[in-house]
Image (cartoon, helix red, strand yellow):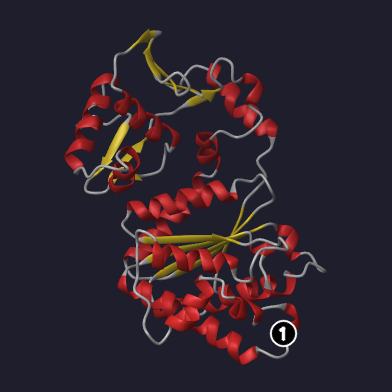
């Protein structure tokens, strides 16, 4: 994409920064940081988030990041005092605040039917502001539940990816899982992915001995454990299912007490009964630990006759989760954003 702001134009495809048509010399890392800030314009991008993205395999301090920001400001005629293009939030991060117009790079015009990340962030600015407010509340120890609803193509997945990046940037533990209605998908698939993130990932959390048998069997998709959640056993294994779901809930609330965390469960419209039951159970446990629990779903799941309609309506009516309804992102809207590139910048 090509981004125009003031007298400048940045082509992310060619990785070139121009000032009134003249190419400016800049290190690749400087341009990478500029692209990241422009594509997330309007929202605060946290220092930790930037450092992890720019130096994924190297341990560096904030001084390295500050040096890059200083180089960008020098190229753009900005400064730490003026901050007309890039604002600093002391101790937290940076926000690109200049008005930006965007259109596809040369050769990309025929592939512009989709929505560029930066345009999506423009379109979902209010939702991102809501995420930021919820994360601030989480930092103060207040839990939050949220349901993000929108049709296919409305940007739900990209939006929650941005939430996870924001949460990691604030130092919160994060985990996500995706529900699947595929015949070969195990029960509780999304929660298995969440548990694996905490137990086996970079944010390793020890499993209490009392909960270990159930959780390890679940993580390893033990056939006997999976069998308890099979549809044919729904009338014979209620106590065992309750024990397993209770173990997951207790482990996640314990994890949140040790380190505030954000958990995202995607595609609740495809969830199995156990996954929805656990999501609802954890929502009602939010008062026990500082946690943000977010689920995404398509509105079709709320239509009468859908297998998850009753459960999801129950969650919405319970008031345990805030509801964010995303309007569709249509091709005409994208064309409108892109055509604004040719207009003169606001005075």
Q: Which residue is mark 1?
A: 233
User: Taking 129 as reference, is 113 above or below it?
Assistant: above
Numbered disc total: 1
Residue 172, x across and y down, in percent: 34, 60
| Quadrant of the frame with the C terminus | top left
Vertical order, 165 against 115 (above or below): below
Residue 251, horizontal then vertical, whole percent: 42, 78
The 10 Å Cα crowd at callout 1, few under 14, some 14 to 19, many 20 or more, is: few
The answer to whether any part of residue 319 appears in the image is no
Query: In this image, 155 relative to 75: left or right?
Result: right
Q: Nearer the viewer, residue 2 or 319?
A: 2
Quadrant in which residue 24 is drawn: top left
Residue at the right extreme, as displayed: 305
Residue 8: quadrant of the picture: top left
Q: Residue at x 24, y 31 (%)?
A: 68
Q: Position of residue 62 (x, y in %)?
A: 20, 42
């Amino acid at each position: 994409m090509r981004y125009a702001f003031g007298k400048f134009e940045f082509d992310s495809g060619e990785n070139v920064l121009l000032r009134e048509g003249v190419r400016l010399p800049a290190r690749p890392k400087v341009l990478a940081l500029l692209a990241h800030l422009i594509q997330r314009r309007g929202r605060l991008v946290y220092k930790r988030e930037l450092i992890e993205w720019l130096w994924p395999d190297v341990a560096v301090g904030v001084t390295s990041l500050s040096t890059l920001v200083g180089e960008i400001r020098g190229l753009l005629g900005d400064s730490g005092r003026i901050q007309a293009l890039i604002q600093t939030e002391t101790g937290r991060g940076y926000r690109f605040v200049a008005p930006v117009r965007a259109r596809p790079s040369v050769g990309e015009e025929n592939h512009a039917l989709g929505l560029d990340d930066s345009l999506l962030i423009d379109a979902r600015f209010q939702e991102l502001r809501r995420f930021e407010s919820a994360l601030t509340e989480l930092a103060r120890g207040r839990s939050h539940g949220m349901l993000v609803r929108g049709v296919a193509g409305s940007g739900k997945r990209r939006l929650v990816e941005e939430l996870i990046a924001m949460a990691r940037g604030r130092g919160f533990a994060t985990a996500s899982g995706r529900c699947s209605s595929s015949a070969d998908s195990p029960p509780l698939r999304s929660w298995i992915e969440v548990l694996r993130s905490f137990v086996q990932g970079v944010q390793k959390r020890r499993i209490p001995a009392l909960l270990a048998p159930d959780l390890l069997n679940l993580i390893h998709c033990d056939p006997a454990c999976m069998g308890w959640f099979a549809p044919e056993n729904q009338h014979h294994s209620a106590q065992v299912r309750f024990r397993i779901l209770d173990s997951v809930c207790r482990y996640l609330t314990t994890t949140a007490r040790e380190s505030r965390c954000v958990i995202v469960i995607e595609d609740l419209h495809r969830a199995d009964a156990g996954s929805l039951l656990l999501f609802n159970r954890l929502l009602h446990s939010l008062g026990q630990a500082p946690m943000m629990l977010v689920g995404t779903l398509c509105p079709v799941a709320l239509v009468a006759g859908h297998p998850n309609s009753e459960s999801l309506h129950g969650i919405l009516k319970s008031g345990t989760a805030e509801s964010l309804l995303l309007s569709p992102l249509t091709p005409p809207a994208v064309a409108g954003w892109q055509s604004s590139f040719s207009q003169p910048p606001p005075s």
